[in-house]
Image (cartoon, rainbow, N blue to C red):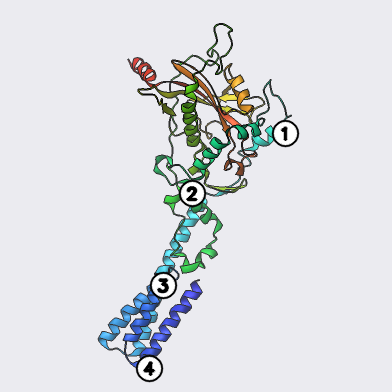
Amino acid sequence: MLVASLLLTVAMIGIAYGLLRTSGGYSKVMMVCGLGILAGWPCLMFPAHGLSSLLCLAVAIVCAIRKTAPVRFLVASLAVTVVGYAFVTSMVLWSVVEDNRLRAEFPVESMATRLSYEDKAAARQAGSVAGLASPASGTQTALQMADGEFTHLEERVQWGEPAPGGGPGWRLRESALRRLHDNSVSDFINSPGFGVSRDIRPRRGYIVLPEAAPVTQPPAEYEPPERPPRDEATDVVTNGRGADKALRPQLQDLHENGLVDFVNAPGFGYVKDRDHVAGFQPHQFHEIPTYQSKEKAGTRWRAQRLELVSLLKFDVPAVYLSEHLPRMDELGGAKTRPLDDFEKPALHALQQGADLEFDSIPTRVRMLGSIRCLQQCAKCHHANRGDLLGAFSYVLKPVAQIEESETAGAH
């Protein structure tokens, strides 16, 4: 549109000069320049032309006051037009340089290498693994049992949560990255208005996310996982049969909030497909999940331990060990442990379609929450909507009890 803008400006100057020669007055010249300004800025089509028209209007006013000859107006108008277009060109070039910097900082990359373990998992023999069902089993059951809740979770991700640390939201960041990589320099220069007037530019503030500090796991002040709560009469894991069922909605909220935090939707960036992703930030927690009991003066609970259960990376399910809340960029070489006696049957239930399994005593809650493939996840992961990708293993304790232990430890 640069050529069109230049032609429009030259035509305006030509018309103004012709009117000036035939009428000898500057009133009609000023009117033509005013129309040029309206065509340039209010319509947001040709800002370079609008700027040149404004400068030509100023020239016309000065020439009218000084009663200069038409040829001097013509020379002065052409001179200010060069100045106006030079200014706009410098702004465009600065934008191009900044866009190139952002492209280098947030390049398009493939997720295939990062997620190569999924291909290995898919190649394993289907069926039971170490007595447990295959990770993807129970998919349709899960969608039939909790489709409303599952859709609600997808909508929370789709419409965006406030970015942790006050950074840009997912949709704004995704749009900026898409524009950054889908528009070539030639498209940018030839766009309406010479590119300057576009309403959404891929600015740094729309793309850069605040650096999230790792969240340290609280000290392990709980019964070791190898010794989960047991029924004294039968010496078997209660696995929810003795659990407080009233806790389920609150635990579900805690798990869903934690899952949305971990998924980190603003960190998705621009995902064209699995092999073309820009600006991806690894999944990570930004804060320790908590929840407040809904009963009057109810107990406030907090995660005392939160660990990621891997289902696809290893031959058998394993739990990552880390001093921080799960961050995918830290777990590549992390140590693992086998599932304990609570987690094994709880995982089996998740694989059969459950979303959450827990067991509670007055001073502690053990919980296993599913991580399933959302619509947004399927763009990169080789999985179908609802497939079980992993799980979070929680140990929750009353906040008052945790603070009391921390105070005692400080002394």
User: Type of residue at label 1?
Assistant: Ala
Q: Are marks 2 and 4 in contact (CB under 8 Å)?
A: no
Point out which mark residue 236 bears: none
**What residue sits right under mark 3 in the picture?**
40
Q: Which numbered disc flags the more N-terminal residue, 2 or 4?
A: 4
**Distance from label 4 to label 1 (Cα)?**
84 Å
Quick one: label 4, few (<14), some, or many (20+) residues within 10 Å? few
**What residue sits right under mark 1 in the picture?**
123
Of tags 2 and 4, the one toward the viewer is 2
Q: Position of residue 353 (x, y in %)?
A: 62, 29
Instruction: Say which quadrant the C terminus sits in.
Output: top left
Q: Secondary structure at mark 4?
A: helix
User: Type of residue at label 2?
Assistant: Arg
Q: Is residue 259 visible?
A: yes
Residue at image x 34%, y 14%? Answer: 408
User: Type of residue at label 4?
Assistant: Thr
Quick one: label 1, few (<14), some, or many (20+) residues within 10 Å? few
Task: Give the farthest residue toward the top.
Answer: 233
**What residue sits right under mark 4 in the picture?**
22
Point out which mark residue 171 bears: 2
**Distance from label 4 to label 3 (Cα)?**
26 Å
